[in-house]
Image: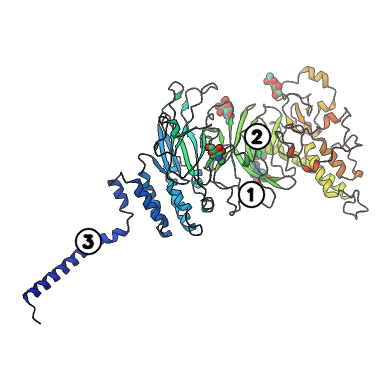
Amino acid sequence: MQLSPLQSRLAASVIASCLLLVIYVVLLSPQFAFAIEFDPIFPDHDVHEPSYEQLDAVEISEVLDLAPPVYEPNFALFDRSIIGRAAGGAIEMTNNEMKKSNIAPGSTMTYVFQASSVNGKAARDRSEPLELRRSVNTSQSSVADVDVDVDGDGDEDDGTALRPELARRKESTKTLWISANTCLQPARRSSDRTAPDPPQLTLYVSTSPDNTTPGPEQKEDTQKAVVFTEGAVMFNTSIDKDVYLSISAPSVSDKDFDTSWQYNYELVASTDQYYFSFHGNNTDPGLIWVDSDASAALLQTNYLNNDSSQVITTPPYVMFAHNDDNIDIRGVRNSYCGLSSYAQIRNLADGSSGVMTIGLKNGGEQNLTRQEFYVSGLNVSSNYTAILARPPGKSLQTRQEDSSDIGGGIVFQPANFSTKPNGACTFIFNLTFCEQTQYAVPGNPQTFPNATALGNFYDDYVRSKWDNFDKVLQQTPCEAPSTARYSLARGCEDCKTAYKRWLCSVAIPRCEDFSTPDRRFLQMRNIGATFPNGTKVDQDILDKHGNSKAFLSSRNPIIDEVVKPGPYKEVLPCENLCYELVQSCPASMGFKCPRPNSKFSFETSYGQKRPHNSLSCNYPGSAHFIGGAGMLSPSWAGLVGVTGLLLITRL
Ligand SMILES: *[C@@H]1O[C@H](CO)[C@@H](O)[C@H](O)[C@H]1NC(C)=O
Ligand SMILES: *[C@@H]1O[C@H](CO)[C@@H](O)[C@H](O)[C@H]1NC(C)=O
Ligand SMILES: *[C@@H]1O[C@H](CO)[C@@H](O)[C@H](O)[C@H]1NC(C)=O
Ligand SMILES: *[C@@H]1O[C@H](CO)[C@@H](O)[C@H](O)[C@H]1NC(C)=O
Ligand SMILES: *[C@@H]1O[C@H](CO)[C@@H](O)[C@H](O)[C@H]1NC(C)=O
């Protein structure tokens, strides 16, 4: 076939064009591939065009929101790189992400929480986004890890990732829970008690587009200002619009404070709940001072579960304690982060537990669980404040499916306790037979150098008495048919329980220092002996009581013979323990209680439980309850009217 000159020219140019195209494709084709993998490109764009329009960013985020789950990680990337720089200087916050920062006195840090970052998700089909949420969560927690871990304190790491279930469950609410904690504050130049406290940080919140940098210099009607209370702040607002928030540090005087120290805070905005809160009354497990001696104290929570089938395996709470004479803790008493920095005695996951031992203890009629804190290394005759807290991000229950209680950290109301003077009383706990006995007992560092040895001495003594009792009980017809039994209402088990409660309370006296002011339920003991410092009891006391055996010796002579404590005061056992024993055990065993009016021995043997009195007599599990009438064992109801009781029961 012959081509015309025109045709051959066309053919030549077609071939040349094809060649060009091939060369073009060979040289430049990777660009086409880049066009869909846009994430490596956008950070570049961002650098060149910092003034990226906010509107565009929102559109992108909404488009991606509707995209299939596989695009979600890209969304998280946009979130930080593009949207994050949108609002002129304000730092972008995302849901449940912790922002931790230093801030110099007199300056302000501004953040923005964009409504679009949560509203789009709320509108999605609820059945679809489970996997989506999980991937958002992972990326958020890794972001938070980077931001948060300034002090390397491992505790906060687990705190930042809320569970996916929780996030999904509360998604439809449109409340933003803003909370912050002061971690550090300027140091005082003087540490005496009249030195002023460092002024508190302030949180400013604006939802007005006219005020995107809330702070002290903005008009009051465009923003809300909330001053921190003892280092913590909580604020909630609806999030139909973007929320602008600032943390502002006050100026502090050079005269009173070392201004080279900055403030440091943690700030979290969440659509689930407050990440940091304080004085949560509904959830307060209560903190009870059980007892102390000159250098140690035991505190416990109320019962944490409602029945013993709810097994609690890990202690859910932490406790901080601080000597009232030391003012370092002032200004951060509601701040988990601040207490972690300033409290003298604290227990943190990083292992700096100092002198605190934490444990769970089961007890009571229903075998419920309390958390206990044993603190040692305390100063004598000192007053302390103890503050119980739940770390952010920890759950109370162990069962995984119960997510209702997960997330926010809470700092609870403080409780007070004090240590005793250096005297006869030594705190014992963790006994094996009298396992409910945990209080100070008459001791002597010369004869029993440590509390464990002293506790074993008392416990072994009680066990030997118990063995005698057990032998006697085996000879009474407990398990006989009901016609032959000593009582239709009570069996041997009741008698054993009552005897053990009574024996542990009577054979192991609860000790108060001799200097404690006189009370009806406090009985002086061993007043003839010398104090550890070599002095004697005042002569007028000896003149008055020197011929009464109840005052001159311990209730249990072996204490004077073996332990040799100095003079002390005994918190008398509750009379109910005796009535219960007499009622529960066979009459043939011969237990009798002294009559309350018989001045002769009741007054020096038993105390009476008074409602709303913090500690008016001793019983297993007694403590310095405040208004704790409800803490009494229920089995005591109806036992008060027992009659016909005479002198009892010697040991
Ligand atoms: C939310 O804020 C309002 C007023 O700002 C306040 O009355 C309310 O108690 C707050 N809710 C919670 C749960 O803190
Ligand atoms: C004990 O007292 C000393 C001296 O007053 C004080 O420095 C120290 O912080 C106190 N320790 C505790 C745990 O109270
Ligand atoms: C000795 O100890 C007792 C009891 O602790 C106390 O009341 C007394 O004041 C002390 N005496 C001296 C001289 O320290
Ligand atoms: C309690 O006693 C047991 C042994 O009887 C011991 O293993 C445990 O460490 C003790 N607990 C405390 C807090 O002293
Ligand atoms: C307590 O004292 C006993 C001797 O009385 C001793 O064997 C034991 O090791 C001591 N325990 C501690 C913890 O010091």
Q: Is residue 323 visible?
A: yes
The answer to which of 628 and 526 lies nearer the viewer is: 628
Question: Which quadrant holds residue 610?
Answer: top right
Indicate the quadrant containing the N terminus: top left, top right, bottom left or bottom right: bottom left
Observer-nearest of 556 and 117: 117
Helix, strand, or loop for circle 1? Answer: loop
How would you rate the neighbour count of disc 1 (Cα within 10 Å): few for under 14, some for 14-19, many for 20 or more?
Answer: many
Distance between mark 3 and mark 2 Cα atoms: 77 Å
| Position of residue 473 in the picture relative to residue 446 (left or right) | right
Gap between marks 2 and 1 measured at Cα: 24 Å
- Residue at image position (61%, 53%) is 399
Camera-side mark, 3 or 2:
3
Q: Judge from the rendering whether residue 423 lies leftward or rightward of residue 213; answer left or right.
A: right
Residue 377 seen in render: no
Dot label at residue 312: 1
Question: Which of the pair 99/282 is nearer the observer?
Answer: 282
Q: Amino acid at mark 1?
A: Ile
Per the image, the residue denoted by label 2 is 297
Element class at badge 2: strand
Q: Position of residue 172 (x, y in %)?
A: 51, 50
The crowd level at tag 3 (other Cα within 10 Å; few <14, some 14-19, many 20+) is few
Q: Which residue is drawn at the image coordinates 44% and 23% (left, top)?
A: 253
Q: Nearer the viewer, residue 357 or 308?
A: 308
Which residue was labeled with disc 3? 28
Percent of width and height locating residue 51 = 30, 44
Residue drawn where x is 67% and y is 41% of the image: 302
In this picture the colour scheme is: rainbow
Q: Which SS class for mark 3?
A: helix
Above or below, 264 against 35 in this view is: above
